Amino acid sequence: MQPQQASPIREFGDFELDTLKRVLVSRATGQTVDITGRVVDALVYLVEHAGQLVEKKALIDALWPHVVVEEGSLTQTIHVLRRALGEQAGEHRYIATVPGRGYRFVAEVKLRGPGIITSMEAPRRPTRILAWSAIAIAVVVIGLLAGTLFLGRDRTPTAASPALADEPPSIAVLPFVDMSESQDQEHFAEGLSEEILNLLARADALRVIARTSSFSFKDENADIGTIAKRLSVTHVLEGSVRKSGERVRITAQLIDGATSAHVWSDTFDRDIDDIFGVQREIATAVADALHVTLRSPMPTRAETRSTQAYEHYLQGRHLFNRRSGSDILQAKARFENAVQIDPDYGRAWSALAGVYLVARYEGFDLPDAMRNWGVAVERATTLSPDLAEAHVRAAQYYWHEGDAKKARAHLDRATMLDPLEPLLVSMAMSQEIAEGRLDEVIEKQKKLVAADPLSAINRGNLGGYLMLAGRLEEAQREFERSLELSPTMIKTMASIADVLMLQGRHDEALNVASRMPAGYLRDQSVAMAQFARGNAAESEILLARLQDRAARPDFDFDIALAIAETYAARNDRDNAFTWLETARRRAQSQHGATGPWVLYDRLLISANLKPLRADPRWEEFRPREK
């Protein structure tokens, strides 16, 4: 007798999927759902890995084997799949996005066999969190009986961590886990942990890992020792949140990264109105345990007394940070709700200003965008004159208005208020590059990488600055590390080709460029490598194709800039400056008054254009301030 074959039928939610026939059926109507090709392939892959984090690269490799594609292709495939499953914007009944990492199929999946249905759902929380779950539920019951406000008794730090004796303290704050009964407080839990992270970042002598890197471990079944090692920190703070009505229970634990021993832990039962006080208490306790001192807190005028407004703000920030699909529009709506509830909520006005900046670059056409952006900036700076973030947002607005004088005034004010404001650090570096202070920029960028070691963008930026400084081997290492962190970043592949070209390794550069997805960046890199290898005819074909792209009425100024770089690599300065002028006109058409500034920032960081700086024509591209 042949062994019985496992059933290919998987049941979840309103659907059943035949993984063998690649057929999805609605159980409500009995009708086949019209999905084919890579969309159904993606569904099968996710269902067969239900409950697990599926990395983007793994999914791309499964759907497009032996083919190089952009991450946007995967995003579009998942978007189509979500629509087929009936998910509305913001819903995650079946597929949850793990920002910066990949996707998770979150619906319970059952394998239908002969006479039985077996659940295939994998654990949705790391083992260490499951253990917390049981503890926290027990503590809730005890708390209700005792009626106490502080239930954790481990309020005194234990003996100093062994790690502290060896090196200065450093910490990663993991996203707190939502343990609310309805599982709808993820934004609140993440917002709480981010607020604590921001407070700890104001401690002297403490290195705090940035949100991007520390939050990348969300939903990943990694132990504390592994996390501490990957982030190069001495300590890790983790916690959980259980919110019910107007009450909230917060548990926090500070753990030694080397020994996994608890250095400090506590549990807080509070009214939601006291949430700001709890955040400060936790940060202070952690600072005390690590023997560091917190600096002054954020100006209270930036905050709100309305817990409802604060809820909307946290939801908006959660969406703003996630930034996929329509998240930016939903974030805008949340921030607008916050300022409608509390018109004096300065930080929400500042966040709303940030939405208008991102929307401008991501192609969202918002009604009366510049006017409303200006209103948000004016309200933020008027209501919260001591909030550095508000002044950075104002500077960004005035850059786009073409008023460099006002922009610099707000940057100066932000610098005086908080020189460590992350938004400020990145903006200030553009000015330092323009002033030729490249060594200072590199050192600052290294600090950003140390604070956010899993950020592909930070490492890529460091590689770019090192390449500009002629430190080519160091630059190559950073670009390669950036590509490891985000394998689908085409611009990083182009940067690796560039740095190999500058080292005279033309064959290797061509090999890298040839593996890039089709597009203008690939054409540019291959054209430059072929010319350097003496294949002028092949290079000319690709250069002509780039110029054809630039002849289209809707071309991006980046294409004209790529052509200018290609001519500069050939030492053809006249054509290079001709195409720089084309890029300037197009940048102004795309970005208005800020166009020349956007282009100039790009010119300053282009190693390929560095030979042009000695030409008198270079100064013509320096924007004039009002």
Image (spheres, rainbow, N blue to C red):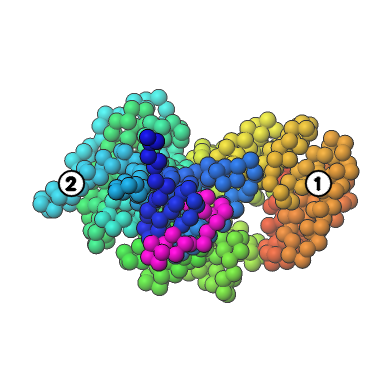
Residue at image coords 56%, 71%: 366
Total numbered badges shown on the rendered structure:
2
Residue at image coords 80%, 53%: 546
469 vs 74, left or right, is: right
- Residue 464 found in image quarter: top right
29 part of magenta stretch: yes
Q: Is residue 447 above or below residue 351?
A: above
442 vs 324, left or right, is: right
Q: Is residue 257 above or below residue 583?
A: above
- State the extent of the magenta-drawn residues as a range: 25-43
Task: Identify which residue, 263 or 199, lies in the foreground.
Answer: 263
The extreme left residue here reads 145
Q: Residues within 10 Å of mark 1 (few under 14, many from 20)?
A: many
Disc 1 target residue: 566
The extreme front residue here reads 1
Decide: marks 2, 1 in contact (CB < 8 A)? no
- Asked whether residue 546 is in view, the answer is yes
Residue type pointed to by label 2 = Val
- Residue 76 found in image quarter: bottom right
Q: Is residue 122 above or below residue 22?
A: above
Disc 2 target residue: 139
Quadrant location, the N terminus: top left
385 vs 577, left or right, is: left
Residue at image coords 57%, 63%: 359
Residue type pointed to by label 1 = Thr
295 part of magenta stretch: no
Residue at image coords 10%, 52%: 145
